[in-house]
Amino acid sequence: RANASVVVANRVLSSITGTARVSAVEATTADAITTAQVAVLSLAGQIIGTGNTYSGPVTFASLPAGAYTATAVAAGYAPGAVTFSIIRNGETVQPVIRLTKIPVLPLTVSVTDSSTGLSLANVLVTVYGPNGLPVSSRLTDSGGEVNFPNLTSGTTFQIGAFLLGYTRPARQTIIIPTSGSPAELNFGLQKSR
């Protein structure tokens, strides 16, 4: 008899389904984040579904009764998660994931000729992320400077510079400060012989 009641309870639970409409918002303003990638996972960690918030909340239909975790990631934000449950047949729940902005600061790179001290224009400056892959590349202006406005605070980057006719120097490493003044880096390029 005890087994019969468990089977009946499992059949009832397995016939209950609901819908989750998952959204991601900025933690302090509650403004919608329309660039988030969202996933719903079972509590065991199995991915149930994924989507993006480009057109608003992501709908996950026909979720069986149970508890779930919704996660979200978006550029410029720390990842976030929230748990929710489906307990009534046909219900729609609306989990909201609050994402916290990651602080960013600008980096200004100045490039000069190491022999003359003159500023060099049109130098290709590349920022490489912690994984060694390029994050952004830009050319220096007529004053030999280039600005990278939004680098994640507290992150280590490598900076490379290239100009035809000059020896390519080793990449320089910089950690973007967590607060305060923008980061600055000076490069001296040496003419090729």
Image (cartoon, helix red, strand yellow):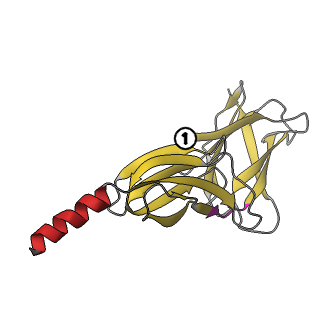
User: Where residue 83 sits: x, y (%)?
Assistant: 48, 66
Give the residue furthest to the right. Answer: 143
Q: Pick whichever, 59 or 10, lies toward us.
A: 10
* Residue 137 in sight: yes
- Horizontally, is 161 left or right of 44 in the view? right
Q: Amino acid at mark 1?
A: Leu
Left or right of 55 on screen, residue 88: left
Quadrant containing the N terminus is bottom left
Q: Position of residue 141 (x, y in %)?
A: 87, 35
Q: Is residue 62 left or right of residue 56?
A: left
Q: Which range is magenta?
A: 98-103
Q: In the picture, which quadrant includes the C terminus? A: top right
Q: Residue at left 45%, top 62%?
A: 69
Q: Is residue 106 above or below residue 160?
A: below
Magenta-drawn stretch contains 99: yes
Viewer-closest of 69 and 88: 88
Residue 182 position, x and y percent, is 81, 59
**Which residue carries the number 1 mark?**
133
Q: Secondary structure at mark 1?
A: loop
Q: Residues within 10 Å of mark 1 (few under 14, many from 20)?
A: few
Residue in the foreground of this view, choosing between 66 and 11: 11
Q: Residue 115: name its quadrant.
A: top right
Q: Is residue 170 left or right of residue 150?
A: left
